[in-house]
Amino acid sequence: MASDVETGRITTDIPARLDRLPWARWHWMVVIGLGTVWILDGLEVTIVGSMSEALKPANTGLGLSSSDIGLAGAVYVAGACLGALLFGQLTDRFGRKKLFLLTLGVYIFATVLTAFSPTPLWYFVARFITGMGIGGEYAAINSAIDELIPKKYRGRVDVAINGSFWIGAAIGSLLTIPLLDPKVLDPALGWRLAFGLGAVLAVGILIVRRHVPESPRWLFIHGREEEGEKIVKDIEHTVHEESGHELPAVGDEPITIRQRRTISIPEIAKTVFTLYPKRTILCFALFVGQAFLYNAFFFTYGDSLTTFFGVKQTGWYIAVFAVSNFAGALLLSPLFDSIGRVRMIAGTYILSGVLLAIAGFSLGGLSAVTLTVFGVVIFFFASAGASAAYLTASEVFPLETRALCIAFFYAIGTAAGGISGPLLFGKLIDNASASKDITGLAVGYFLGAALMVLGGLAEAFLGVKAEGQSLESIAQPLTAEEAHEGGNAETGRTQPSPSPA
């Protein structure tokens, strides 16, 4: 195709100039404008989990069963998988900014649609479209953030931002306390308002997001180096003004690029499966483990509390659980840049998996409080590891494929764990509810634990030491001249002859 042909060849120092910048208020604007989307995702998932009982009555809710609640969770995740793949491809093709504005718009529309659901079918369709918007966000936002944040801070910023999901979870759980209290609001209205508040928050994020620029890295790859140069100069000027100091010298070497307007899907597929087989296996293992762990446990956590322990207001429990998750991602995130990716990811995955298995063996003797305590400890570590899965997929593949690679592994991993998890746990709860025996959930805990441990082992043997490295040194762009002159794809180092595996 004409759009795929080479349009030019340039040597640029844009990546090195972005990577050497000190942290400034401008970077906080990027974090707030882009990173806060995970708060929306946390809000969505938690509202559904907390209001499971409110959705069950036919007169004030939608007449959903426990299996329907699990199905709604699976439908949401299925939409997220499809949205990630669809919008991920478009993000690499048309740019980061166009897509992170579009996907947020899809989310706002679908969330309002959910709030006005008159029937279960309407609700399921609205949840599917909401998931599409959120899935597209994961692809567009992770790629944009990693391409704008300096290499020194990329690990901690990415892990903390992905962990901010749990800020939304805490907000959602606390909001459901008054919204689902019949003394405060009509039960038929409260759950609808809970969804509507997500749309209000998203509009505020959209206002900030308009000021985030297109990725200069994406621009120079696609033959728009003049636009990229202008954006970088503006960023440098802003950071200089905000810091009050001269900017550090550019340390890394310039990179020579063969520009293309687009990169074909076959070439992207070849990159993922042929040039980077070890990284492909690694990302698949990390995403399957964390997706099953979280979606299986958290989508039905509120339902478990009400079904087996008679808890009427699950909001307080989920809020405590959510605070622990965000604290883990926030407090442990600097260690991913200092101790390193491999040790931290492997350690958090294996430890959380072992602790979840212990919880499975202990289910028969747990109460609502002790189950929550187990969750608090397990997911303090798991949240940091799960957040780092997105960081890994974002930084270990070439720039031209970044958004689609994030989307691909998110979709495959989440389809395997995120769809089957809620469905499995919904069935397990239904089967065990008659006898009120929570030990029937143990099989799900053991499966989640095994997948997390396997993910940790995959990181230990296949992980990439990406801390403090530029994105271009971790994985050379497909259009970089060095990539055509011979290099090791898995290491990114130039060698006399190619050795891609």
Image (cartoon, grey):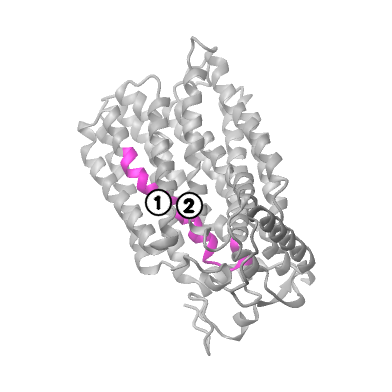
The residue beneath circle 2 is 159
Front: mark 2 or 1:
1
Cα separation, mark 2 vs mark 1, equals 9 Å
The residue drawn where x is 40% and y is 21% is 313
- Say which quarter of the image contains residue 470: bottom right
Residue 325 relative to residue 128: left or right:
left
Q: Position of residue 327 (x, y in %)?
A: 41, 42
Q: In the figure, is residue 305 to the left or right of 212?
A: left
**Residue found 44% across the figure and 47% down from its top:** 330
Residue 434 makes an appearance in the image: yes
Q: Position of residue 199 (x, y in %)?
A: 64, 32
Q: Is residue 186 above or below residue 404?
A: above
> Within the magenta stretch, is there residue 57?
no
Q: Residue at x 43, y 36 (%)?
A: 299
State the residue lying farthest toward the bottom: 496
Earlier in the chain: of badge 2 and badge 1, it is 2
In the image, which residues are magenta? 375-402
In the depicted structure, whether residue 200 falls above or below residue 324: above
Q: Quadrant of the N terminus?
A: bottom right
Q: Amino acid at mark 1?
A: Leu
Q: Is residue 400 magenta?
A: yes
Tell me whether the residue at label 2 lies in contact with that at label 1, contact meaning CB atoms closer than 8 angstroms.
Answer: yes
Tell me the element at label 2.
Answer: helix
Q: Looking at the picture, tell me which residue is in the foreground, 161 or 398.
A: 161
Q: Is residue 90 left or right of residue 150?
A: right
Taking depth in this image into account, of 121 and 17 the one nearest to the observer is 17
Three-letter amino acid code at disc 2? Val
Q: Is any part of residue 79 visible from this angle?
A: no
The residue most toward the top is 183
Crowd around label 1: few <14 · some 14–19 · many ≥20 (10 Å)? many
For label 1, the SS is helix
Q: Which residue is mark 1?
A: 332
